[in-house]
Image: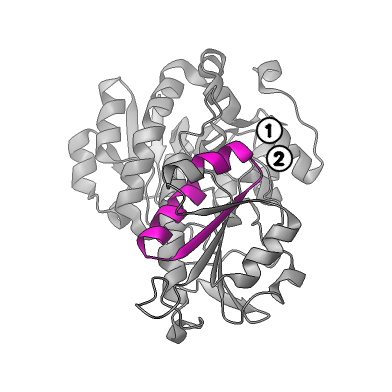
Amino acid sequence: MKIGCVKEIKKHEYRVGMTPACVAAYVQRGHQVYIQNGAGEGAGFSDDEYRAAGAQLLTKAEDIYGSCEMIIKVKEPQPSEYPLLREGQILFTYLHLAADEEQTRALLNNKVTGIAYETIRLDDGTLPCLAPMSEIAGRLSVQEGAKYLERPFGGRGILLGGVPGVQRGKVAILGGGVVGTNAAKIALGMGAEVTLLDVRSSRLAYIDDVFHGAVSTLYSTEANIRKVIAESDLVIGAVLIPGARAPKLIRREHLSLMKKRSVVVDVAVDQGGCVETTRPTTHDNPVYEVDGIVHYCVANMPGAVALTSTLALTSTTLPFGLEIAEKGPEQACRDNGAICRGLNTYKGQLTCKEVAMAFNLPWTQAEQVL
């Protein structure tokens, strides 16, 4: 199969979909790999490294889209890339369609085979291609939140760890999954007081166990959310419903309960955000203020640590990509339920129920269209 990897064009996205080691793995299996010039520079990989691994380098993204059967990326295609996608082409990347109707319709109209990293799900319910970026985003959320709590950046002037004789900062985390757990780990490491909310009692028990009671746990109810955000200096939105839009747990009316110049970091922004006042931002202009509350809503947080993120991401996506390349998407989906659950669009049909519900579109189970 001819496999292509283009340079990411989303603003301040420095990750790359394939490392030179990935190229070597595909080439060893007999595939041809085409890399756009400069695609790996942001993550620290040179064109010479890709050539040495067996890739062919092309200057224009148009040439890669035009000649390759499968495109491997990191982020969803941008509007300028929609016309380059063609019928039957495999797009293997993060899609986040439930928050992006324009992209959804573009993939359907172009009859693209869209396989989304974030909906590849194993039989035990885990999301192997999303987990590494969730780990990084969870850890970054506290790091960035701590920075924007500093007064020069618009925050309250709070040091999360405090000092002897002064109360420590308070962190509230909505969601106890991979993002929330990693956020709690860093917040505790900084010395903050941490409260985590989740709707699953089993997850709260797990959090209580692994952190030896150092993290306060609460069942996620309207009353508990209102109480905790009113007391907190930093609120982390870490809610995920795989493939679906994030629920709005913090509404605009809730902002009046919060301390002025406290900070919200909405990690769920890719899926529409779990804060009503969330809108996507970029690394060069990451925050804005609503009703006195600082919002950090960068839609590609792991892109800031591109080398770490690229290595973590490609280590999990490579085995699935190889299987798709060797078997073709149809047989790969039949043989591997995780890949089948990752299929979002196929031959103009929507195969992800959660995306269909977000936009009131018809959908068909993947097993029925393959």
* Most frequent secondary structure within the magenta stretch: helix
- Location of residue 5 (image quadrant): top left
Quadrant location, the N terminus = top left
* C-alpha gap between disc 2 and disc 1: 6 Å
Q: Amino acid at mark 2?
A: Val
Height in image: 173 above or below 211?
below
Asked whether the viewer can see residue 37, the reply is: no
Residue labelled with disc 1: 352
- Residue at the location (65% across, 71% down)? 230
Residue labelled with disc 2: 355
Q: SS of the residue at dot 1?
A: loop
* Callout 2 touching callout 1 (CB < 8 Å): yes
Q: Please give the range of residues in magenta.
A: 178-206
- Residue 343 magenta-highlighted: no
Residue 218, image x and y in percent? 62, 52
Q: Amino acid at mark 1?
A: Cys
